[in-house]
Amino acid sequence: MSRESDFITTILLLLLIFILHPPAYAADTPKFREAPAFRNGKNCSNSTIHIAMTLDYSSPYLRGSIAGLLSVIQHATCPENTFFHFLAVRRHFNNLNKTITSTFPYLNYNLYHFNPTLVRHLISSSIRRALDQPLNYARIYLADFLPVTVNRIIYLDSDLIVVDDVAKLWNIELNERVLGAPEYCHANFTHYFTHKFWLHPTFSNTFENRTPCYFNTGVMVIDLQKWRNDGYTHKLEHWMRVQKRYRIYELGSLPPFLLVFAGNIKQVEHRWNQHGLGGDNHEGQCRDLHPGPVSLLHWSGKGKPWLRLGSKKPCPLDSLWAPYDLFRHKSLFSDS
């Protein structure tokens, strides 16, 4: 057999192998349908609403991010006035840019490089591995990554949908507070920290002269200028270092925010974070909405709507998330 024949045979074998066993990246690349173009209403001004989210191209949370993004612009009175700030790891930039521009060709956005090494050494293991990912801590660094000209931001998690005009949330008055979020004072606040924390006066005295209540960090309005001026990133990092040494909590990135801000935030209407729809962090069982009106539904907890819908075991409220799902292909993902 000639060298030319050997070459052709080799090429054919390689093509056959590629067809039968495609590379993992080809099979796992998420595909999304193009979203409709939403335009401004008649009375829109030139003011800009800034929204920050994290994007993880390598995880099923991207599907949730795309659904959440669609829900924001679909319900906005002035969608063209909305500017999105996405934090992601640099190696995903090309794929994310392709995904965003093909799914939302008209979107105003910017991608920022979040280096996982910035925070990885500060992360302690929690009750669920998904809570330990560096991107879960990126919200701590928003004031460092976003331009100094951006003085206010709405931070949104990847497992929620907005069913109201986000401008209503944007326009809340913070009254000199750094952070605004719905508070839940009926929750047993002691559960968010270990016995070691409450038995150690240096730690428990943190809440002296404060009336701390639980708030969920998946929906926050933040005054970035005040944050920068008062060094809140360093204050949060301090508690992460304490956690590394003393193990004072179990819940990932939430407790540092409670330690720094609880009892000193601007209370936002509960309608802006109907949280806990993903159930608890162990079982992820079905839950109902809290009483009252709804502007934002949040599947915080272990159970995610895209996983339950894909496994044909949805919870009743997952049907409210489904209309915003632009994912094209059925695929089995796991959240651990």
Image: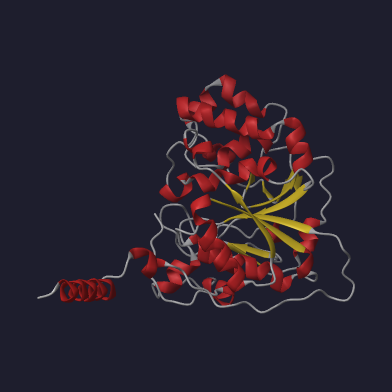
Q: Is residue 275 above or below residue 73?
A: above
Q: Quadrant of the N terminus?
A: bottom left
- Residue lying at 79% horizontally and 65% vertically, measured from the top left: 81
Check the picture and name the quadrant holding the C terminus. bottom left
- Observer able to see residue 332: no
Residue 273 on image: x %, y %? 66, 58
User: Is 232 or 48 nearer to us in this picture?
Assistant: 48
Q: With 164 as the anchor, is 15 left or right in this view? A: left
- x then y, percent, for residue 305: 49, 67
What residue lies at 58% left-to-right and 36% top-to-bottom? 256
Quarter location, residue 47: bottom right
| Residue sticking out furthest to the left | 1
User: x%, y% of residue 83?
Assistant: 73, 60
In this rendering, is residue 1 above or below 58? below
Q: Please tell me which residue is depicted at 79% across the width and 62% down the height of the picture.
A: 167
Report whether 194 appears left or right of 45.
Answer: left
Camera-nearest residue between 224 and 163: 224
Q: Position of 3 compared to 53: left or right?
A: left
Colour mapping: secondary structure
- Residue 140 image offset from top left, x and y in percent: 62, 41
Vertical arrangement, residue 290 with respect to residue 133, above or below? below
| Depicted 209 relative to depicted 171: above or below | above
Q: How many marks?
A: 0
Residue 321 visible: yes
